Image (spheres, coloured by chain):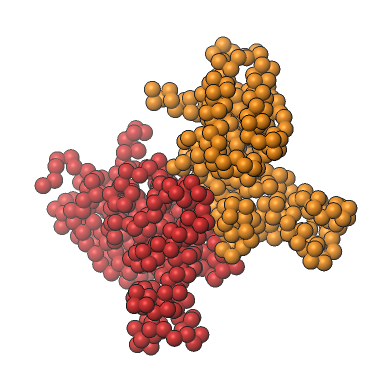
Chain colours: A orange, B red
Amino acid sequence: MLKVNQQLALAVDLGGTKIIAAVVLPDGKIISRNYCLTVADKGPKAVFNRLLSAANKTVTQAKLKTSELTGVGIAAAGALDMERGVITDSPNLPNWHDIPLRDILADGLGITTYLINDASAAALGEHRFGAGKGVDNLIYLTVSTGIGGGIIMGSKLYSGADGCAGELGHMTIEAGGPKCNCGNLGCLEALASGTAVAREAVRRVNGGETSSIVELVAGRLESITAEIVALAARQGDSLACDIVAEAANYLGIGLANLVNIFNPELIVIGGGMSQMGNMLLKPARKVVKERAFKLPARTVRIVRARLGSNAGIIGAAAYVFDQQLERKTKA
Amino acid sequence: MLKVNQQLALAVDLGGTKIIAAVVLPDGKIISRNYCLTVADKGPKAVFNRLLSAANKTVTQAKLKTSELTGVGIAAAGALDMERGVITDSPNLPNWHDIPLRDILADGLGITTYLINDASAAALGEHRFGAGKGVDNLIYLTVSTGIGGGIIMGSKLYSGADGCAGELGHMTIEAGGPKCNCGNLGCLEALASGTAVAREAVRRVNGGETSSIVELVAGRLESITAEIVALAARQGDSLACDIVAEAANYLGIGLANLVNIFNPELIVIGGGMSQMGNMLLKPARKVVKERAFKLPARTVRIVRARLGSNAGIIGAAAYVFDQQLERKTKA
């Protein structure tokens, strides 16, 4: 039973594949949740409609009206201008350029709306209710198709001048390295993401190396994913083990950079690749010890995320409550 | 004439070559200043004595007693444990390991003492009274013999869990790059510092390339410094121009990383290498535009520091006043 005057946030996670909408309480509890496919190839308008319908359905499901909500938080992937509530570019949403998503949803739903980067939202979620509970300074890294990040400092999300801080996957760690989706060379994302792992497997198999990976995809190399490579590695396939070790080494270099820059108490690793667990994290932690300064390397704990695919919506809701509190404090 | 109840801080900058001590007002004004050589090779004890005597002399010179001071801020290079006030390691002070400098000076002077990394102090100085006045979020980078950094967020110094955040010179930007003083490979410092520039010049001259650099040092290659290389570059020497361009490219890569990570309003570049001015900064800015995300690359301004060699003492004093204010606010 909801309390009278209970604060409630509507959180929406807009991904390249699916949309999740949920009504969330200030303690991180989800009281209603819905999801649908994004179908990004039908263009922005179709996605707006799906977002609005998922949002409305979730609110109705919770037996609420939108007017009873504190606000809406939308977590979205891509380069955002948080101040203006605009998605400037998104690798997962082709043809989305300078889309004022915040205002579109605010108009459609009639309540205060915030736009936040999905990795920043997940960082906030993990900080409040997941692996980072009670920690003042933490770095969140999601290692998935791409690599995103979020920075929590003094228990608050640090979002920078335009709200697009935390692009930790786009640190150059190999100046002449492979081209990244963002246009730069040798980004962490281009070397340690799921996409990088799959691409490297295809390249080496095409180069003539033998591997059980080929069998696992029945010869269809286009079906190779990081999950397949991880599976083969777990079965002892030496090429797969090699590729995972290489990704772990690069991940470790990226983490060592973050340790030297932020001297954080905690680094939380989420995203699909984190499900590899210690196969990925153990060698990465070793690289941190070897490469980073002694004191911060000793201090930092590097752990897996806890909230899974709910991190984004829980964090987006936390952001709404934070903003509300800040407005009250200022008023 | 000093006002009654005027707050006053004693600031000490301990470098590998020289010690600067100054009495500083809350508005950044220096009312008395002294300096002496560090003579680090005589061992820690000799340095403590010089520090204390420089400090006492400066206070006397200002017609003050140490009891009239708000506190002492010591800015020092190297890996510090700020919480414990300990210099754990210092490249400029050989044989300094786990030296509890804060407590040694606090005992010697009889007042509250803080230990702060010299680049962090300079960041604070530039933020309060130099190139970063009025800016909320800025990154300070000192490009000198080594490369150090300081992070200002929400107008405060961000110092991390142990107080050793901001080691921006020790981001790996070339995973298999040259060995850095810190033990890591391919750090920004190993590729874009004054030491890297001089080392590269020696390597290429030894490799048989002709250059006016050799003439400028009268054949004594061990005398090659970044200043000499810059001078030769300004005179049009093609090898020198090449080496400066390479350092600028690496500096640009490091800056692009900082832009993607922090989305800062401003990056302030200090240290000896910054005196190269646009010869270094113009190509570095170009690399930032090419490599970093569009929005934060458009937002950030990359400028030269303004306080010169006083940045450290002015910042160390600002740190003392900040801490004092925080203690009062908490009390």
* x and y, in percent, of residue A129 in the image: 61, 32
Locate residue A102 relative to residue B54 in the image: left or right: right
Q: Is residue B155 above or below residue B330?
A: below
**Residue extending farthest left:** B1
The residue drawn where x is 54% and y is 23% is A107
Number of numbered markers: 0
The residue drawn where x is 48% and y is 35% is A84
Q: Say which quadrant the C terminus of chain B sits in.
A: top left
Using the rendered view, name the quadrant where residue B147 is placed. Answer: bottom left
Using the image as rendered, state which of residue B67 and residue A58 is in the foreground. Answer: A58
* x and y, in percent, of residue B322 in the image: 32, 43
Q: Is residue B293 above or below residue B170?
A: above
Q: Is residue B29 above or below residue A136?
A: below
Locate residue A194 relative to residue B7 in the image: left or right: right
The residue drawn where x is 21% and y is 62% is B34
Q: Is residue A126 visible?
A: no
* x and y, in percent, of residue B132 in the image: 33, 49
Using the image as rendered, state which of residue A54 and residue B177 is in the foreground. Answer: A54
Q: Is residue A91 visible?
A: yes
Locate residue B298 relative to residue A131 in the image: left or right: left
The residue drawn where x is 57% and y is 26% is A105
* x and y, in percent, of residue B222 in the image: 40, 82
Using the image as rendered, state which of residue B317 and residue B194 is in the foreground. Answer: B194
